[in-house]
Amino acid sequence: MAIKKTYGFTLLEVMIAMAILAIALVAIFQMQSQSISMSTDSRFMTTAALLAQSKMVEAETYSTLTNRREDGDFGPDYPQYIWHLEIGDTQLQQFKKIEVTVINKLFINRGKYILVLYKTPGI
């Protein structure tokens, strides 16, 4: 009686190969998701920093730095971003604190950027 050789994979080999493939795919998808999240955070930080700087320049050009609070948005170019400006006193009388906060309404937790400047009112 001749022994018949069979070529192919057993069910156990196929299941092990599928498990390895599943583990690899989960790791790849997780890295892709993390990459997208980091890209979104980076885009927010860049945009918010530029918007806050533009609002800070506006605040610096005020003829007098009186204590005030203002809120607004950046118009149709950046509809998801809002700003809050606060000019207040510091412990040193010769300085005023200018604080600009930019908020992305679409982000729940990490969507806030704060820029602070201390300035002498006459300069």
Image: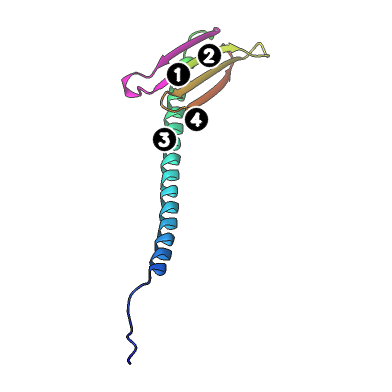
In space, the residues marked 1 and 4 are separated at their CA atoms by 15 Å
Residue 108 in the image, given as x and y percentages of width and height: 47, 27
Left or right of 96, for residue 72: left
Q: Which residue is mark 4?
A: 110
Frontmost residue, 5 versus 62: 5
Disc 1 residue type (three-letter):
Trp
Q: Is residue 38 magenta?
A: no
Residue 79 in the image, given as x and y percentages of width and height: 35, 22
Sequence-earlier tag: 4 or 3: 3
In the image, residue 67 above or below residue 113: above
Q: Which residue is mark 1?
A: 83
Sequence-earlier tag: 4 or 2: 2
Q: Secondary structure at mark 4?
A: loop
Q: Secondary structure at mark 2?
A: strand
Q: Which residue is mark 3?
A: 43
Left or right of 37, for residue 120: right
**Residue at coordinates 64% horizontally, 12% vertically from top-left?**
94
In space, the residues marked 4 and 2 are separated at their CA atoms by 21 Å
